Image (cartoon, rainbow, N blue to C red):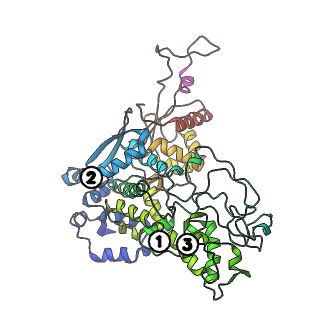
Amino acid sequence: MRQLQDLLIICGKCLPSWVSSIVENYPFILPFDLRRQYFHLTSLGVAHAIQHLLQQIPNGDSLRQELRDVRLVRNRRQKVRIHRERLLESACKVMDLYGKSQASLEIEYFGEVGTGLGPTLEFYTLLSSELQKRGLGIWLTKKAEPAEPTAPTTGGPAAEDVPMDSGEADGLIFGDMDSLAAKPSEEASPKPAASLSEGPGAEQQAPKPASALNFVDPLGDGLFPVPKKEVGKEELGYFKLLGTAFAKALLDGRLLDVSLSTAFWRRALGHNLGIYDLVCVDSQMSKSLVKLYEAAYSGDSSTMDGMPIEDLGLYFTLPGHDAYELCANGGDTLVTGANLSRFVDSVLDAYFGSGTEKQFAKFKEGFEGVFPLKTLAIFKMDEIDTLICGQTEKWTVEMLSECLKFDHGYTASSPYIKQFLHILADFSAEEQRQFLKFVTGAPRLPPGGLSALNPRLTIVRKNFSSARDSSGNTPRSESMHTPMNDLVLENYDLPSVMTCANYVKLPPYTSQAVMKEKLMYAMRESNSFDLS
C-alpha cells in the first residue's frame, strides 16, 4: 500500500516489479479496494493516477494545492453538445471522435442550460438505457408480453404426456432464446418434452409497465449477445460503442448502468467457456443442455432418462431459434445418440464461439482503443460490474446522517432533516435509483457507496421562491382573503438539485408526508437540466 501512495514512484512509473507480480498473479489475496487503487494508479496513465490521488487528499492539505499547481495534473476537458432526442446516434459519433482522448468528456444538451458533471453522468445513464432496448435485437431476452399460465405447446412427440401440475418437467425445456416467458419452478414430471415454449406450471408473472417492456429482460445473470450467423454492421457498431463507453467511463470516473453477464466478461477476458457457464447466459435452457451433455458423455449416449435420443425430436438448429442451423441442412438433421455430442458442442460453439465471435471482437476493439482490456483481469467478474456500474446499498438513518452534509440553514438536528432522512431510509430499491439519478445523474453509487460519493451529498435549505404568480403576487388561501403564511408557501416549492455538486435544495415543508410527495414528484418529472 505504501508503494502505491508514493507520488514519485507513480509519476516515474517506478513501481517495483514484485508489486505488479503479486497483484496480477495472486489477486485473490488482496482486498478489492487495494486492487482498485492499483488499477487506477497503473493502468490509466500518469495524469489519471495523480488526479485519483488528488481526490483522496483532504481539502486544505498543502500537498493538494501543490499537485494542483503542477501542469501535468490539470484535468483537460472536452465539451460536446448533443441532441437529447438523438442520443444513441450522437453517442456513436462522440465516442468515435473523443473516446480515445485522455481529456475528460463533458456533455451538454441543445436547448438546456445544464453543464458539468450532472449532464455528463446522465448521458452515460441514458446511453445505458438506449443500449438495452429490445428494438436493437442484440441481446438475449425474455419475451415482452406479460406471462400467462397456458397449456404447453409441442414441438416434440412426448410433449402431450407432460402433466399440468406445478413444477418443471424433468426433461428438456428449450425456451425461445430471445423471447422466453417465465422462469422455471420446481421439478415435477418424469416425462421429457422437447422444444417447449414454456415450462409447464410456470408461475404467472405480474404485468410489467409498458415502458419496462421496451427494454431487455436477461435470461441469465446479465446481458449476453444473441448468437447469429450473420451480424449487421450497425449491430457490430453497438458493441464497439459499448466497449468504448465502458473504457471511457472508467477513465473519466463515470458510471454506466449496464450489467453484463458473468459469462460475457469471462469471454471478453479470454477465458474458455463450457457447458456449466451456460447457466449465466440462459438459466432455463442450461438445465436441458446439461442433461444432454451428461447423456452424450456418460458412455451410453443412445438414451436419456431411459428414452431414446431420437424420440426427443431435436434437430441441428439452435434451441429456440430454428433459423440458426448448427450444420448444413441442420433443420432436417435429427439428433441421435450417435451425433448427440456433436449437437451439444455445436450449441456451445454458437454461444461461446463462432455465434458471438464478431460481437466480442468489436467490443474488445472499442474497449482497447482507450486502454487494454486485460488490465481488468485482476478483478472478479462481479467486481468488474461494481467497478463500471457502481453499487447499491441499504440506507439507514444513522448511516445517512454520517455520510450527508447539512449546510445553509440546516443541521443534522433540524426537524426537516430528520424527516428527510427517514424518507430516504424507507425508499425501495427502485426509489433509491430514482433519487440518485435525480441528485447525481447516475442511478447507482460509486464503489464504496454513499460515503465514497465525491463531492459529498449536501442538503441545504431552500426558501420559497416559486410560490408567486406571474405578477409577483403571493397566492391566497381559497377560504381566506389574506396571503398564506410562509410555512404554507413552502409547500408550493419543489426540491431542486445541482447535480454537478451533488447538492439538494430542500424547502422546509409542513409535514413529512408533504415532503415525500414533493420529492417523489420532482424525482419522477425531472428530465432536463434548467436553472434552479
Q: Do we see residue 305 in this rendering?
A: no
- Which residue type does callout 1 highlight? Gly
* Position of 477 relative to 398 (above/below): above
Which picture quadrant has residue 26? Answer: bottom left
How packed is label 2: few (under 14 Cα within 10 Å), some, or many (20 or more)?
some
Residue drawn 49% across and 46% down?
A: 436
In the image, 69: left or right of 511? Answer: left
Q: Nearer the viewer, mark 2 or mark 1?
A: 1
In the rendered image, residue 352, in percent from the top left (x then y), is placed at 49, 70
Q: Which mark is residue 347?
A: 3
Q: Quadrant of the N terminus?
A: bottom left
| Magenta-highlighted residues | 463-491
Q: Do we see residue 84 in this rendering?
A: yes
Q: Is residue 465 magenta?
A: yes
Q: CA distance from mark 2 to mark 1?
A: 49 Å
Residue drawn 51% across and 62% down?
A: 224
Q: Which mark is residue 353?
A: 1
In the image, 306: left or right of 481? Answer: right
How packed is label 1: few (under 14 Cα within 10 Å), some, or many (20 or more)?
some
Q: CA distance from mark 1 to mark 3?
A: 9 Å
- Which residue type does callout 2 highlight? Arg
Residue drawn 74% across and 82% down?
A: 306
